[in-house]
Image: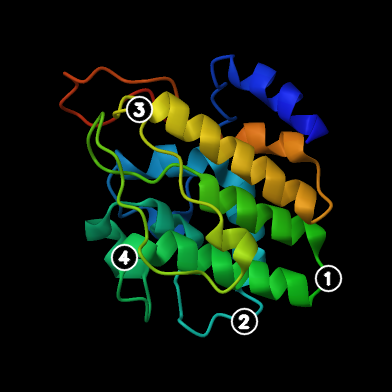
Amino acid sequence: MKYSAVLVAGLGLVYAAPAPAPALSALSALSAREVPQEHSHNKFLDLVRTSLNLDNPKKIQDPVFGLLGNAAAVTGAGAVTNTDCLQQETADQAFTNAKAAGDLVGMVGALMYRAIERNTGGVGKASVICNETAVNPEIAALTQHQDPASTNAASINKGITLELAKQLAGIGADPLLALESGTFAPGDLSDTTGAGNSYKA
């Protein structure tokens, strides 16, 4: 694909940390460790939230829960029982709703959200990949970015970004948007706080 060379060149650079955004007041009870990192991609959460609210049969409380570790995710998972798949379920429903509404921006938001790194609570720990198949093939083609300090994260995350670019192009969106799904720089494996280099509000 003609965009591949541009993306590969872009992926040779360190991912820039996305602009910070305030945490949702409804989630203020969650730990300080978990919320700031997930809200670093808040514009995509906002898009998914809007699309998800059009039809939310599984009563997922908010997209941010899909980016949290299982212990926190379960509190907002609604009828989703496999918390390892909450991020995918959220993205899949949001994509379905946006597609039905003819909302390209909403579809982009769902794809971007699906590729965002999920919290694992420890520097260098990779998140579990969902073992279920999404309804939408565009969502099914994607997995989440991994902690940049985890094993083979650099190559894994580059592959995810390239696949995201392919899916974005497939729906008529700018494939270079995939670069905005990037995670933070690798943290110190000796960091016992689990915060890594995530944004601290």
Residue 83, disc: 4
Horizontally, residue 197 falls left or right of residue 194, namely: right
Counting residues from the N terminus, which is met first, the one under dot 1 or under dot 3? Answer: 1
Looking at the rendered image, the disc whose residue lies closer to the viewer, 1 or 3, is 3
Q: Residue 106 sits in which quadrant?
A: bottom right
Q: Amino acid at mark 1?
A: Gly
Is residue 198 at least partly visible in the picture? no
Q: State if disc 4 and disc 2 touch (CB < 8 Å).
A: no
Q: Amino acid at mark 4?
A: Thr
- Structural distance between the alpha carbons of marks 1 and 4: 29 Å
Horizontally, residue 49 falls left or right of residue 81, namely: right
135 w.r.t. 70: above or below? below
Label 4: which secondary element: helix
Number of residues whose C-alpha sits closer than 10 Å to that of mark 4, classed few (under 14), some (14–19) or many (20 or more): many
Which residue occupies the foreground of this view, 139 or 16?
139
| Residue displayed at 44% across by 34% down | 156
User: Where is residue 120 shown, x and y percent of the image?
Assistant: 28, 43
Residue 55, disc: 2
Counting residues from the N terminus, which is met first, the one under dot 1 or under dot 4? Answer: 4
The image quadrant where one finds the N terminus is top right
